[in-house]
Image (cartoon, coloured by chain):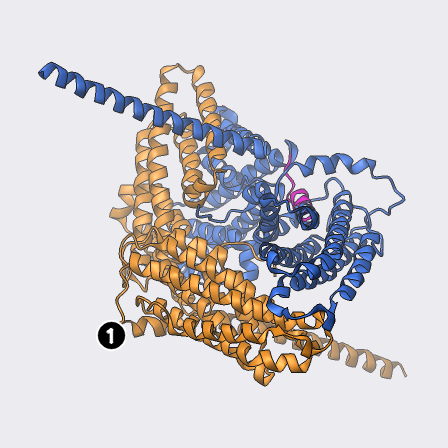
Chain colours: A orange, B blue
Amino acid sequence: MADEKNEGVLARLGEELKAKSSSLKAKVVELLRKTKKLAKDDPRRIVHSFKVGLAITLVSLFYYFEPLYDGLGASAMWAVLTVVVVFEFSVGATLGRGLNRVLATSLAASLGFGAHFLADLAGDKAQPVILSLSVFIFAAITTFIRFFPRIKARYDYGFLIFILTFCLVSVSGYRDDEILQVAYRRALTILLGTFIAILICLFICPVWAGDDLHSLVSNNIQLLANFLQGFGIQYSNELKEDELLEGCKSVLTSRQTEESLVNFARWEPRHGPFKFRHPWKQYQKIGSLTRQCAYRLESLNNYLVTETQTPLHIRDRLMKSCSKMSIESSNALEDIASDLRTMTQPTFPNPHIEKSKAAMKDLKAALKIGPGDGDIDLLEIVPIATVASLLIDTISCIEKIAESVGELGSLANFKCVEAGKSSDLELEQEHQKLPTSAIVNDHCHVVIVD
Amino acid sequence: MADEKNEGVLARLGEELKAKSSSLKAKVVELLRKTKKLAKDDPRRIVHSFKVGLAITLVSLFYYFEPLYDGLGASAMWAVLTVVVVFEFSVGATLGRGLNRVLATSLAASLGFGAHFLADLAGDKAQPVILSLSVFIFAAITTFIRFFPRIKARYDYGFLIFILTFCLVSVSGYRDDEILQVAYRRALTILLGTFIAILICLFICPVWAGDDLHSLVSNNIQLLANFLQGFGIQYSNELKEDELLEGCKSVLTSRQTEESLVNFARWEPRHGPFKFRHPWKQYQKIGSLTRQCAYRLESLNNYLVTETQTPLHIRDRLMKSCSKMSIESSNALEDIASDLRTMTQPTFPNPHIEKSKAAMKDLKAALKIGPGDGDIDLLEIVPIATVASLLIDTISCIEKIAESVGELGSLANFKCVEAGKSSDLELEQEHQKLPTSAIVNDHCHVVIVD
């Protein structure tokens, strides 16, 4: 009897252990799956990790080689620190951080040295007071300056480093007699670390923020084209795809990433098809118009769900034109996206926009109802009538997008249609693979609550 | 003749100088105006600047007092560095950064010490190889881990500091025989710096991310109430206020700030009316429903512009109900916002929601048109009909907001209506002053292109 009980307990324990180990196994498998997905979504992440490892290892070599170490001494540590902090995913972000760091360090080191010099003149007793006061004033003012939105956007890191270095140099001068040496070594090692970080970031499989911005904006237009295509077909075939709506929604969340990328891209030198002073800000304009269009498409989706209430005889009359309009709009957007991707000046007027306008005229004619249509509940017509009016809105939105891409084209000297598209096909193919969500995740350092 | 010419030149030079100095003056005045506005929008910014100055000055005292300096030596610099880097605007952000820094440093220091120990065993020649290899592997893996969205959200800074400290400790062990001393001092000074930063952040006019989240979310609901109020009056009085639309749009851009604030608030201890483990995530749910409502209100605004096309006899019939619906919806939203602000459990069902539902029924009846209405162009009715349908949508949205505030109330034990509202009136008044844009600017470390 007792044995049986024991056996039962043992068996239960065994089962529990099995359950726990299998749940652990499931978790490990899940983690591996997620890791694989993260690497597959954007393989540049793996390359980036190796690049960071390489840069840090290179910098740490200063410690191992006698002659290098003798020149720098323990300050070599600042070089390691710099590489870790400065190395970002894209060239633009790394350059921005690096330049901020180097300039702020140099400026703060000289000012800190000045403060130390002044305090020195004042005598031994007054020295700590003057130093503390100058640290307090500089720290408070710099902290306040960081609240200015424009400064926050491009120079936040620089101002942080400015406070840091100023305090370090002016304060450590109180103890260290070789303050000039300290300031000089700190500036030199930071320059060295920044140099190595930028070098590796720039020459080993560089990730250009400008490239990513370019493909993000054109991808987003393509996503809207896909949605409208699906919407047009759906209106005759009743098939529904959540994926298309997801695409449309991801367009709406990419604003912040676009802003970051514009800021990063402005630090980058010319590369590939992008000249120095490429009009990056224009991409933001296109992006904002794209989002305006995406809002309309999202509302379209709402009315699809309630469409069944519409009286059939009216619905049939409108459906054909609606479907035609959305498919032509989709083609127009696809044209724009592909022109942007291949950097070709778009043709004016776009033939698909003209066709969708013609369909719009048919639709407007079909929207007139007479007494022959019998009693009508307006609320029942609202869905289909709203779809019609949203589609009409969408067309004017698409026209604006086409215009702003045209503006970009003339600002950035896009090639004209006569020139072949072959040379940029490679660029096009490479970038089509990256989904919007991957680009957002790569560049946005914003906190995301799962 | 020549004299006259000279005089002319001098006069022109003088004018140019005047023009330049006056344009410089204008620029300085503009800068002062902006600075004043920045300080006036949120006076906590000035307090924060002073707090940072104070904390840094306090930490730098370690250099001036003999006994303190003797214990720490040049490592005291790490304390200064820590304060500069850890001190953030809100308590939650500072705590999060501080804990990340302290934990990551301790973990990395012990691992770095372990790596150094292993390398030591391997002999003099193999030592640099093993050290370099371990630095490379750890740096690469940690960099990759930072791409996981969940980790990025809360522990990005910790992982950065982990790489940093691991490299510093393991590598400097090659030269410095007192590696244990180095690791210990670094950990101690970082702990000290973090402690001072948290202390000052917590006890001198603390800025709670939770408070700001609470007022941001309730402010946003209030902004929608204001918009609907204006919309309802406008429909009978034709007055138009851009300010209301601006408010509505600022709701749409506050998503990222809400996410940051939730992340920060989760680090915060109990304070004021907020208990430990206050359901912060629920605020995000309310916020996202608020934004869904804001989208609808933004669309409403579009239809107001085109309303003149609607045939008068139909418009008059609908206007009264529409106006009533929007004013009642506005009252309902105002109730919800004030319940949230004062942390009172909202009443179910909300009387204003019921009233707006009654108005909705009138509207639905008014929307039926018969043959007596003559020829009708549907496109002309679309605006007013869409306004009606958007308002109906808005009501269901408001119901959802009320529900989620109710959920928050039961999760966080909001007081019931019977209890007085006096105790929290202070909280309410204090927070009503801060506009959404100020809160967004204070907490969002995101790059903004002007």
Q: Is residue A177 above or below residue A12?
A: above
The residue positioned 85% from the left and 82% from the top of the image is A3
| Residue in the foreground of this view, choosing between B424 and B71 | B424
Amino acid type for the residue under numbered disc 1:
Gly
Asked whether residue B126 appears in the rendered view, the answer is: no
Instruction: Check residue B12 for magenta coloring.
Output: no
Q: Is residue B277 above or below residue A204?
A: above
Instruction: Check residue B215 for magenta coloring.
Output: yes
| Residue A11 percent across, percent down from the top left | 78, 81
User: Would residue B154 appear left or right of B415 to someone viewing this image?
Assistant: left
The residue positioned 79% from the left and 55% from the top of the image is B406
The number of numbered badges drawn on the structure is 1
Asked whether residue A161 appears in the rendered view, the answer is: yes
- In the picture, which quadrant includes the C terminus of chain B? top left
- In the picture, which quadrant includes the N terminus of chain B? top left
Instruction: Please name the predominant secondary structure of the magenta segment in the image.
Output: helix
| Residue B430 percent across, percent down from the top left | 69, 35
User: Would residue A184 appear left or right of B423 to someone viewing this image?
Assistant: left
User: Would residue B219 appear left or right of A192 to someone viewing this image?
Assistant: right
| Residue B41 percent across, percent down from the top left | 57, 34
Q: Secondary structure at mark 1?
A: loop
| Residue B194 percent across, percent down from the top left | 56, 40
User: How dense is the environment of label 1, judged by Cα within 10 Å: few (below 14), some, or many (20 and up)?
Assistant: few
Q: Which residues are magenta?
A: B206-218
Residue at label 1? A420
User: Would residue A74 appear left or right of B33 to someone viewing this image?
Assistant: left
Q: Is residue B267 above or below residue B128?
A: above
The residue positioned 54% from the left and 69% from the top of the image is A391
| Residue in the foreground of this view, choosing between A271 and A121 | A271
| Residue in the foreground of this view, choosing between A373 and B204 | A373
